[in-house]
Amino acid sequence: MFFVFNGTAANSLSLAHLCQSYHSVICHELAHIETDECGGPEFFSNGSKLLNAPGPNGKLTPDGIEQLITKRTDIHYPRPRVISLTQCTEVGTVYTIEELQAIREVADRHDLQIHMDGARFANACAALGVSPAELTWKAGVDVLCFSGTKNGLAMGEAVIFFDRKLARDFDYRCKQAGQLASKMRFIAAPWMGLLENDVWLKNARHANGMAHYLAERLEAFEGIELLFPSQANSVFANFPEHVLTALRARGWTFYTFIGAGGARFVCSWNTTTDLLDGLLEDIREVL
Ligand SMILES: *Cc1c(COP(=O)(O)O)cnc(C)c1O
């Protein structure tokens, strides 16, 4: 297990570690590594190409993966080496254990490794009520990027290789990429606070609970449509344009360019029902 500063470094360096430059990484078209890391994985791997597949609710499917793998098998095409799964996905949905196992089956057939972008991994464990082990190595995940930043820490991500052989020299890769903190204890120590007494899980459960609270009430409004099932800690919704403008005029800030569009609301360890009630009240008035 290794610590790095942020999720882009965790993903980029772990993917680079699994690939030669002539390999490719299969990911969803909305994957953070594809849309939000400024080409980091390609840069740190010296050119390993990301191959995108569509899939409902931000998730790769075994068929979509298989199609990418079998589309070309000649030497002119970068050879697929890794499947990257985001758990929870960029649109707030969760891969079930059965879905992970089905993807592992495709991976085994084609000798691929599975990387998991776990920026919201804790939220997935909380949502499914399963242990981290069940959701990773027991379901065939080879490398997990486990986020501290998205679950209450100031910064820091853990990169976990479930096969020690795969981790060989990863410390050198981190150092070369500027990810070795000389005062590493300031990244490592907060993890003790997060992991002891299940604080990581409590934080995630709280965040998920707040998102459910929000989703349930948003859905009840006429004229508002949820874009995806809200299975963890985020809610994506379509609002009439004038509502977005009016909410912003009242001081609410939110993005509408992430994932497949729509207003995105992400709940965290410190979201309160008071805050959400304030938002819902403003939406009601504006509507
Ligand atoms: C936030 C996030 C990351 C990491 O982003 P950094 O800003 O580099 O820490 C990676 N993947 C997903 C899905 C994320 O939400």
Image: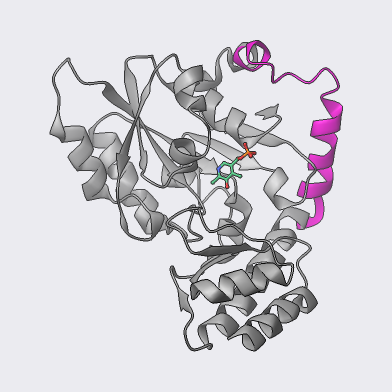
Residue 175, above or below 242:
above
Residue 159, above or below 235:
above
How far from the left and from the top, in percent, is residue 38?
52, 30
Residue 181 magenta: yes
Toward the viewer: 92 or 262?
A: 262
How far from the left and from the top, in percent, is residue 67?
18, 41
Toward the viewer: 281 or 265?
A: 281
Residue stretch in magenta: 173-198
The quarter of the picture where residue 83 lies is top left
How far from the left and from the top, in percent, is residue 40?
52, 26
Q: At 49% from the left edge and 80% from the top edge, which residue is drawn? A: 224
Q: At 29% from the left edge and 51% from the top edge, which residue is drawn? A: 61
Q: Which secondary structure class fits the magenta region best?
A: helix
Residue 208, above or below 176:
below
Q: At 78% from the left edge and 45% from the top edge, which residue is drawn? A: 153
Residue 211 magenta: no
Residue 272, above or below 6:
below
How far from the left and from the top, in percent, is residue 56?
32, 59
Is residue 88 visible to us here?
yes
